[in-house]
Amino acid sequence: MALPLTGKLAIVTGASRGIGLSITKALAARGANLILAYTSASSADSTAKLASELSSQHSIKVVPVQADLGTVSGPASLISQAADAFSPLRIDILVNNAGVAYNDKVPDIKPEDFTKSYNVNVLGPLLLVQAAHPYLPTDRSGRIINLSSVSASLGFVGQSVYGGTKAALEAMTRTWAREFSERATVNAINPGPVRSEMYSRNSDEFKRLIKPFIQNAPLMAARPGIDDPEVVEEAKTAGGRAGEADEIAGIVAMLASPESAWCTGQVICANGGMIFVSQLTYKSLSQDSTQRTHAGTMETRQTDSSDPFEDVLNLEERFYSEGYQLGIKDGVQAGRIEGRSFGMQKGFEKFLESGRLASKAIVWANRIPHKDGTASGQACTLPPLPKNARLDKNINTLYALVEPDTLSTENSDDAVQDFDDRVKRAQGKAKIVEKMAGGGGREAAGASPTV
C-alpha cells in the first residue's frame, strides 16, 4: 500500500535541528522526497548525514541545501538548487519552519535584532513563497505550512519583536490562502514551548513569566508513569511539560496530507491548549485563591502555591473579574438613582407649569365680563376682557385641562403621558387666550387674582 505522500516533494526550512528535524522525519516516513534547507556551514555535516539516513531508511530522495533565508537572495538560491536536484521541479509541500528569536523588553530592543528577526521570520518566508510559486501544483493539491507561535496571540513579556514577526506570518497565511487558492492550501500552526535548543536558551525570568500559562494549558500537565521521568521533574518547576518536537511534526504531517484539502487560511492549535489562557480561564481562578461571600464582597484565602508571582496573577485576575461584575451592578443602580432624580426634577417642573397655567385660567375667568361690562370677580382690580364667546370657551377649557384635582399623580406610563398631553394642550390654549385678550392678557400672565 502506497504511503500518503509517495512521489511528492517537500521543502523544509530549518531542517537540521529541533522542530524542523522532526518534521523532516515525519514527512519522510510518509513517503515524501525532501529538500533539507539549512543556514550555517556548521550544520552541513549533520544535515548531510540526516539526508543519507532518511534516504536509506525510506527509499526516498533527500537533498540537503544551504541557503541563508535572512538575505534577499537566499530564498531564490534555495529554489534554484532545488530545481537542479529535481527536474522538472514541482513543489508539493513547503514548510516555512526556520526562525530566530530575541527576547528583550522594549527599552532593551536592538534595531539590528529587530531587522534580523523580520528578515528571517517574515521576509524570508515571503520571498521563498514568491520564488516557489511558479513550481506549485495547479490542481490545489499543494500545501504551504507556516510555523507561527502562541506568542502572536498571548503577548508574552519580552517578545515584542518575536511575537510581532509571528503575527505578521499569520496575517500572510490568510492572504496567501486566497492568492494561491488554485494551487495550494495555506495554513499555519502555533506551537507553545517545545523541548528544543531554541527554547532552552530562554532566560529563567521568561520561563517564570509564562509559567501561569503553562500551568493551565489542558494538555501540558505532566503524567508520572507515562511521561519520561526527566519531563515530570522539569514540570515541577516549569508548571507543566513543554511540547515535544514530534508532536508538532505530527500536526504538520496532518496538514501536508491529502485529507487536509478542505482546510486553508487557518492557524491550527499546536500548543496543548495553551491559547485558552488568553481567555482568562486559569484553573486556579476556579479553585481556592478567592471565595465570593455576601452581597458581592470577597474573602481571600491563602493558597498552597509555591510561586508568589502566580498567586499575584490569580488574585489580580479574580479581583478584576469580581470588580467588573460589581461595577456593572453599581452602574445599573447609579443609573436608576440618577433616572429617578431626573424624573422627579422633570415631574416637579411639569407640575409647576400646570400650576402657573391654572393661575392664569383663574385670573382670566375672573375678568370675563358680565352683561353690564364689569368683570366676573367681585373684587377683581384688572380690567375686564373683551366680550368674546370663543375667548370664554378657551379660558374654561384651559382651566379644565390643568384643574389640580383632575391631574393624576400615578407613576405609570399612561398617567405620565396623559399629564404631558394635558399640559401641552393647556399651553396652547394659554397662547390663544393671550393673543385674543391682547396686551391685557400678557400683563396678567404672572399675576395672582384678587378676588
Image (cartoon, rainbow, N blue to C red):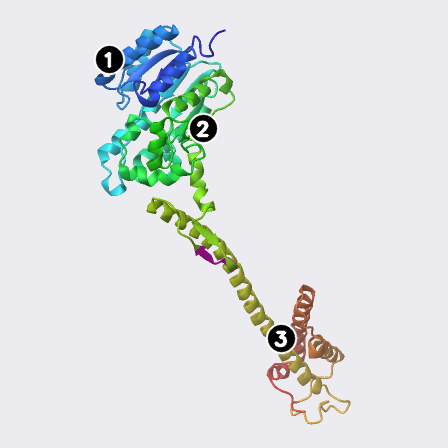
Name the mark nearer the viewer: 1 or 3.
1
Residue in the picture at 28% in, 11% down = 49
SS of the residue under disc 1: helix
Residue 81 x %, y %: 30, 11
| Labels 2 and 3: the sequence-earlier one | 2
Between residues 339 and 25, which one lies in front from this camera angle?
A: 25
**Residue 180, percent across and down?**
44, 21
Mark 1: amino acid: Asp
Q: Nearer the viewer, residue 423 or 200?
A: 200
Residue picked out by circle 3: 351
Please name the residue that numbered disc 2 is placed on: 268
Q: Secondary structure at mark 3?
A: helix
Question: Distance from label 2 to label 3 (Cα)?
Answer: 66 Å
Between residues 352 and 335, which one lies in front from this camera angle? 335
> Magenta region: which residues?
295-299
Instruction: Using a 10 Å C-alpha cutoff, classify the residue at mark 2 as few (fewer than 14 neighbours), some (14 to 19) or many (20 or more).
Output: some
Q: Is residue 327 above or below residue 85?
A: below
Give the residue number, with chain letter if any, for mark 1.
Answer: 45
Which residue type does callout 2 highlight?
Ile
Q: In the rendering, at what x and y percent does residue 274 appear?
A: 42, 35
Question: Farthest residue in the bottom direction?
Answer: 379
Whether residue 408 sits left or right of residue 162 in the image: it is: right
How far apart marks 1 and 2 lie (CA) works out to 33 Å
The answer to whether one can see residue 135 in this image is no
Q: Measured from the top left, where is residue 170 in percent x and y?
A: 40, 30
Q: Nearer the viewer, mark 2 or mark 3?
A: 2
Which label was assigned to residue 65? none
- Residue 313 is covered by the magenta coloring: no
Q: Is residue 105 above or below residue 79?
A: below
Question: Taking 15 as reference, is 236 above or below it?
Answer: below
